[in-house]
Image: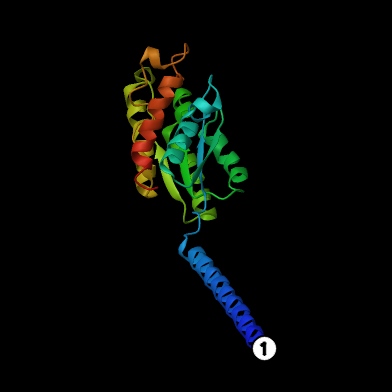
Amino acid sequence: MIHKNVFLLALLLWCLTACSQKKEERSTTDSQAMKEDTPAPAKTKNILFFGNSLTAGYGLTQAEAFPALLQQKFDSLGLPYKAINAGLSGETTAGGKNRIDWLLRQPVDVFVLELGANDGLRGIPPQETTRNLQTIVDKVKAKYPEAQLVMLGMEVPPNMGGTYASQFRVIFREIASKNNMTLVPFLLEGVAGIRSLNLPDGVHPTAAGQKILAENVWEELKTIL
């Protein structure tokens, strides 16, 4: 009788051990399957906003500039993009041509070009501005041939002269067309010339104006993200 009880106890222990092992194996297998089925998080991509005071958010905090406002948009939509504000107040296309190499040391997945306004205000010949912008684009394409390219168009005030204004306006369209760039026709659309949306200098957007700039850019940028 004792032998029989010992046998039954041993059998019970064996069953419990075997069941436990199978449960652990099944749990491990299920965990592995869950890991395989769970998609890896999307890699964050860099959007480089390369421009002048309009991009830098002159007179405002950087959080109020349109690149930061677009970052809020990316985050709210769950888009894996990081906005890098490389705006420099007073920058011309000639200055940008020399500065771009340093910025291209970091990965660039989307390049947004906003330069030329200061050229226009200084009356720089459109041909020179065109050459400088093309050089900048060429450098980006050479370093990151797969990067998406976006051009933010600009216009000059009428007091610069009708002929000059016309020649200046087409620069951005021609560069964008030549290089297969997404074009925002006029960055300051809905802001330029409206006193309440500009700082006292009448040139740089207020925080409210920057929100409109962000929407102008987003309307075209969202088509490639």
Quadrant where the N terminus sits is bottom right
> Residue 7 appears in which quarter of the rendering?
bottom right
**Residue at point 38% right, 37% down?**
218
> Residue 126 appears in which quarter of the rendering?
top left
State left or right for residue 111 relative to residue 5. Answer: left
Q: Is residue 169 visible?
A: yes
Q: Is residue 90 visible?
A: no
Amino acid type assigned to the residue bearing label 1 in the image: His
Task: Specify few, some or many for label 1: CA neighbours under 10 Å numbering under 14, 14-19, or 20 or more.
Answer: few
Closest to the observer, 73 or 133: 73
Q: Position of residue 55 (x, y in %)?
A: 49, 30
Closest to the observer, 184 or 30: 30
Q: Position of residue 16 (x, y in %)?
A: 59, 75
Closest to the observer, 82 or 186: 82
29 relative to 208, above or below: below
Q: Position of residue 63 (x, y in %)?
A: 53, 28
Chosen colour scheme = rainbow
State left or right for residue 56 relative to residue 176. Answer: right
State left or right for residue 35 relative to residue 155. Answer: right
150 relative to 197, above or below: below
**Residue at point 38% right, 26% down?**
212
Secondary structure at numbered mark 1: helix
105 relative to 29, above or below: above
**Residue at point 47% right, 60% down?**
38
Closest to the observer, 12 or 48: 12
Q: Position of residue 159 (x, y in %)?
A: 37, 17
> Which residue corresponds to mark 1?
3
